[in-house]
Image (cartoon, rainbow, N blue to C red):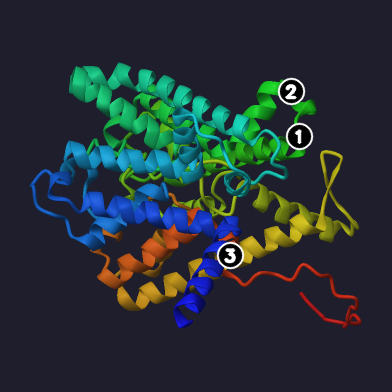
Amino acid sequence: MVGDIKVTFIKKKLKALELNPPRVLALGFAGLIILGAILLNLPIATKSGESIGFLDALFTSASSVCVTGLVVVNTGEFWSLFGQIVIICLIQMGGLGFMTMATLVALILGKKITLKERLIIKEQLNQETMSGLVRLTKYIILSTFAIEGIGAIFLSTRFIPKYGLVKGVWFSVFHAISAFCNAGFDITGNSMIPFVGDMVVNLTICTLIIIGGLGFSVYIDISRNKRFNRFYLHTKLVLLITLILIVVSTILVYLIEWDNPGTLYNLSIKDRTLASFFQAVVPRTAGFNSVDMMKLKDTTVFIMIILMFIGGSPISTAGGIKTTTFGAIVLTTISVIKGDKDVVVFKKRISQEIINRSLAILSVGIFLVTVVSLILTISEDATFLDLIFETTSAFGTVGLTRGVTPNLSKFGRVLIILTMYSGRVGPLTMAFAFAKKQKSKLSNYRYSEGNLFVG
């Protein structure tokens, strides 16, 4: 009797788990991270033939799946070819989303995509309906491989002459995937610093990062409608905010760092401009760097923290609170200052639900970054600026660091792992995943309004 009750209880829990797409997504990413940690913990994964230890393997796996790029060891120098292959596979699966990869496997095996699987895909791709989900998934997979392939070809023109045919091809493929998935992992040993003045490498990496951070729905809209005035509001806002952030941050980095001997001062005007552009693009959200991060001025570091927190765009490989969230909040603020009743952009009104969701994402993001940074000030030996930079980099799944990552304590590494995981899955998705099921019945009464003074 007791056994039957336990079985019934377990079945109910499993059923609830299956019917909660956010929870499946959250647990799916967690499962992928653990699998990666097991593989990276194997002696065959390191060049020395000795296991790195489960915690560091877990950190590297989490950073890979969450397409972050924070590392406790030098990826190119420490990991064997097997380890590097595991890392790039985790990056690819993490960038596309584990359900997208699961759909790819199902399509290859000729299996049908069930209704439950479609619900999870719908949640992952942030779609309003389930119409055309499989077709959209196919498009995402094919376009991803095509873009990464083209990027690898361009990079090979520089890497093959420098590293030889086999190594050059591997470097090209690895960095193309890492850039498009906004991961920032490198196997050169010193990120893109050796290529600070190389136009092909810099522009290819930046283009892959920007395309990967725009979002798959933007590609579809552009390919279908061609002209800007025909694009959906989402596409227009993503393109506009992305352009503004890149242009403004490039100018700011150039003006702030141009006389800094540790970064831009000793470079030519062309190389200064290229390095400024590169460092304006990578905080959103791929952790490559072409100058020494430790020698940046504090002003530049603070600007990068803002860029990392904003991140890329929805339904993309990027992290952060997203460009559209940032845009919705800015537009709402402008509307309030102007005294407008509605928030309007491109002759379209933004709904109150979207504004509320944007404010919730911003609030949760600021709370998470602030709390983690404060806790790290207790457990770690580093300046507050470096720690909040590290935390924001983890939350925004960026991967830039000011030398903090390798020196983190065990507690600090666990905290950063959780921050990367929260940033990749999304704070609201995490909340929806593990919160109790909301009541579907609407209340038949409302409380009276109360007056509240703000500002």
Q: Which residue is mark 2?
A: 225
Residue 258 as seen in the image, left or right of residue 20 = left
Neighbour class for label 3 at 10 Å: few (<14), some, many (≥20)? few
C-alpha gap between disc 1 and disc 2: 9 Å
**Location of residue 268 in the rendering, given as x and y in whole percent from the top left corner:** 36, 28
Mark 1 residue type: Tyr
Question: Which residue is nearer to you in this view: 152 or 220?
Answer: 220
Disc on the earlier residue, 3 or 1: 3
Could you tell me which residue is drawn at 26 percent across and 27 percent down?
Answer: 170
Q: Disc 1 or 2, which lies upstream in sequence?
A: 2
Task: Identify residue type, mark 2.
Answer: Asn
Q: Residue at x 55, y 44 (%)?
A: 312
User: Which percent across, then down, holds residue 394?
Assistant: 42, 57
Task: Tell me: residue 419, above or below residue 134.
Answer: below
Observer-side mark, 3 or 1, equals: 3
What residue is shown with label 1? 232
Instruction: Tally the marks.
Output: 3
Q: Is residue 398 visible?
A: yes
Picture coordinates of residue 199, whole percent (x, y): 39, 23
Residues under labels 3 and 2: Cα distance?
41 Å
Depicted 200 relative to depicted 333: above or below? above
Mark toward the start of the polypeptide (3 vs 2): 3
Task: Give the CA separation, mark 3 to mark 1.
Answer: 35 Å
Horizontal side of 171 relative to 130 (left or right) equals: left
Q: Which residue is mark 3?
A: 16
- The reply to whether discs 1 and 2 touch (Cβ–Cβ < 8 Å) is yes
- Classify residue 88 as left or right of residue 107: left
